[in-house]
Amino acid sequence: MTAGPIEFYFDFSSPYGYLAAHRIEEVGAEFGRDVLWRPILLGAVFKASGQSPLVSQPLRGPYHKHDLLRTARRQKLPFRFPDDFPMATIAAARAFYVLDASAPKDAKRLALALFDTAFSQGINISATATVLDVAEKCGLDRVAIEAGIADNTVKQRLKAETDGAIDRNIFGSPFFVVDGEMFWGNDRIPDLKDWLRTGGW
Amino acid sequence: MTAGPIEFYFDFSSPYGYLAAHRIEEVGAEFGRDVLWRPILLGAVFKASGQSPLVSQPLRGPYHKHDLLRTARRQKLPFRFPDDFPMATIAAARAFYVLDASAPKDAKRLALALFDTAFSQGINISATATVLDVAEKCGLDRVAIEAGIADNTVKQRLKAETDGAIDRNIFGSPFFVVDGEMFWGNDRIPDLKDWLRTGGW
């Protein structure tokens, strides 16, 4: 492919990220664009932006819980909030980057399985052991991923991706960048598609 | 019309409200729904929700400024930020409610003219005199509106609409309610239309 990729930033604790993860590869395929998945840590982003997770905010929280349920129905996806939401996602994000360099397709497969564990099954994926269980069920090398999560290169990669996202003014999840144009939110995927279709407005 | 109306909540300082004001009557006409325009004071709403105006937030502000410009281009509307943004909108909202009870079409006409003054021409509409100038240009009765703005019934009406919005968990502008279903944002108008078209998901 000669055209630039769609960069897909997300945090594994983001329910709208889960909904987007099930749609974005289809968009890439439709427009001949690779999709680069880039998990980041929203906690660090929120510190920079002064925000807090949507669903824990007064007034906004109930609206978004309702909206997540109706949007999941519309996308024909199951939806269940994990216990003890929001979750810590450092182990999940590191596990992704363990695979990303050498086996990017496996990394995406693991990412989808982690999202499904959290938001289809409603299982909290904070614990490293849970992340490794999911990886094992995907047929991936549990021992190698466990070692990789503790590796300094992987830790630095996740930190660099998160810092890089803040530097680009990315402040939420999911967040898409294509041809230098930014789109925030699962609900902006139609706009992203229209931008790619028309060449922009 | 027998089907319930689309309630359209907004604050006159809301640039996405301006963009929505130019689209929502067409949606009502398409689906045989009246549109009830309901200006409120977002300042009171933000106190309840712990939010602040979008464009003044770190990271989010630059994204939304860019998004407003591209969305206005897409809707083929001029767009200019007023000086000294955000604006006080108590006079504008009260002027709307002066007309709303007896001449709702004039109230909507004034609302659109106020929005256009603010976001097409970039003129700050905080001052009562500016609001009255706009009303006069619309061929409305300046003296009657000036008296109405100071009237206690009108003041109470605006307070009641704002309090009512908070009670309904409305936390932003524009905000739409139809058949008990809520949609937040100019970018959710396609979802609102799809909901009306399909009967919901």
Image (cartoon, coloured by chain):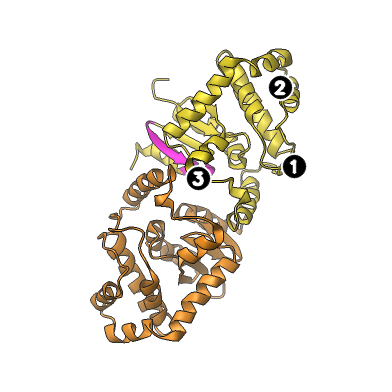
Chain colours: A orange, B yellow
Name the mark on residue A128. Answer: none
Three-letter amino acid code at the position of disc 1: Asp
> Badge 1, how many Cα within 10 Å: few under 14, some, many 20+?
few
Residue B80, horizontal then vertical, whole percent: 71, 44
Badge 3: how crowded within 10 Å, few (<14), some, or many (20+)?
A: few
Q: Which residue is mark 2?
A: B135
Q: Are marks 1 and 3 in contact (CB under 8 Å)?
A: no
Q: Nearer the viewer, mark 2 or mark 3?
A: 3
Relative side of B162 to A121, left or right = right
Q: Kindly report which numbered mark, 1 or 3, lies closer to the viewer in this rendering.
A: 3
Rendering coords of residue B110 (x, y %): 65, 24
Which chain hosts label 3? B
Amino acid type assigned to the residue bearing label 3 in the image: Gly
Q: Residue at x 44, y 82 (%)?
A: A154
Disc 2 and disc 3: Cα gap in Å? 34 Å
Drawn side of residue A142 relative to residue B39, left or right: left
The residue marked by circle 2 belongs to what chain?
Answer: B
Q: Which mark is residue B83?
A: 1
Is residue A36 a member of the stretch shown in magenta?
no
CA separation in Å, label 2 and label 1: 20 Å
Amino acid type, mark 2: Ala
- Say what secondary structure mark 1 lies in: loop
- What is the chain identity of the residue bearing mark 1? B
Q: Earlier in the sequence, mark 1 or mark 3?
A: 3
Q: Position of residue A57 (x, y in %)?
A: 43, 48
Name the secondary structure under disc 2. helix
Q: Please determine whether, in this image, residue A76 is positioned above or below residue B76.
A: below
Residue at the disc numbered 3: B50
State the SS at label 3.
loop
Q: Are marks 2 and 1 in contact (CB under 8 Å)?
A: no
Residues in magenta, as a range: B179-190
